[in-house]
Amino acid sequence: MNPRLGTNHLALLIALAETGSVAAAGNRLGITQSAASHRLREAERRLNTPLVRRSSTGVTLTEEGERLHAFADRFLRELGRLEQDIENTRASGRDLVRVGQATYSRFHWLPAFLEFLERRDPTLSCDLSVGATLRPLGCLQEGAVDVTAVYGKPTGSRRFRWQWLANDPVVAVMAPDHRLAGEAYVDSSLLANERVFSYPFASDPGFEWETLIGPPTTPYRRLTVLQTPESSIDLLRAGYGVALFSRWAIRPELADGTLIAKPIGQGGLSLDWWVVTRADDPPDAPSNRMVAAWLDWVAYGKQGFATLSFDGATGVMQDPGD
């Protein structure tokens, strides 16, 4: 079935939501108020549904209008990004791959990987998507990224192809002079009365703290929730508490000695990291060529993700539901 609305209708809905006025929306789009009103009535007629509430002070979107607005915002941003990607690819002669990474906005590994990629597959170029930090699989499904690195366990969705990257320890991070610095390891009983900085692993389902690492046996009494893990680093350096990190993400601070890391529990705790693509991407798609280069880089070890504290070989796995 062909869509009843075009991009011009979607752009109008975005402008109406942001301005609250038909005249202002038209001005933003470079059309007259009369043309904007006609376009709005046309959209409502095609859907047989009111999309705005009209009042003496302007317009607001109805519930149906809000649903369309949310879609329009994602769709037009992605369309613009895709058009730019195509233009850049044609201009550079390279295939652009947008890469995301769950939870951590830390890319100290990227320069070395890009040097490797230039040798491994000079037909590829890489761009980062910050939006995938909180929504790695959602952004992949929507097309905002082509490849994303995530941790935990593969979902049951047939939409994705998961390839195992490495296993990395989750560690308690603190200042070198912290009172727990002399402990061989820490657990929830030692952290119960400490200031513990928490942050969302990711907002996609299945990435919650307790889903991934289990609930603490002793509740944290002084838990401070921050928006990003990186926002805790300066506080940790100053001795104001403890935070849990995947070890690779805190590697620069461990290397320069400004922070130290302790295992979680006597046996330690770790998470598997994966690179994920859309299952319907062809084997020779730029996304899968990027993954092949990424896995090769990790396999070389000493000069690859070993710098992030990753160890071990890589492997390929389809979702359990496939």
Image (cartoon, rainbow, N blue to C red):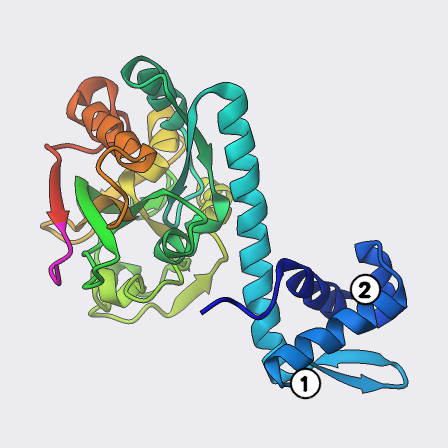
User: Mark number for residue 50?
Assistant: 1
Residue 241 image position (x, y, % from top left) = 41, 52
Work out which residue is located at the far front of the displayed protein and give it: 1
The answer to the question of whether label 1 and label 2 lie on touching residues, with beta carbons closer than 8 A, is no
Compare residues 150 and 52 and report the one nearer the observer. 52
Of the two numbered discs 1 and 2 on the same chain, state the one appearing first in sequence: 2
Please state the extent of the stretch shown in magenta in the rendering: 318-322
In the image, 271 versus 49, the foreground residue is 49
Q: Residue 297 is drawn in which quadrant?
A: top left
- Residue 292 position, x and y percent, is 22, 30
* Horizontal relation, residue 104 to residue 73: left or right: left
- Give above or below for 140 relative to 313: below
Out of 230 and 313, give the one closest to the viewer: 313
Distance of label 1 from label 2 (alpha carbons): 17 Å
Q: Main secondary structure of the magenta part?
A: loop
With 44 as the anchor, is 97 left or right in this view?
Answer: left
- Which residue is identified by label 2? 25
- Please name the residue shown 20% across and 44% down the image: 169
- Report the number of discs: 2
Write down the quadrant of residue 33 in the picture.
Answer: bottom right
Mark 1 is on which residue type? Answer: Pro
In the image, is residue 81 above or below residue 76? above
Question: Callout 2: helix, strand or loop?
Answer: helix
Q: In the figure, 283 relative to 22: above or below?
A: above
Q: Amino acid at mark 2?
A: Ala
Q: Is residue 321 magenta?
A: yes
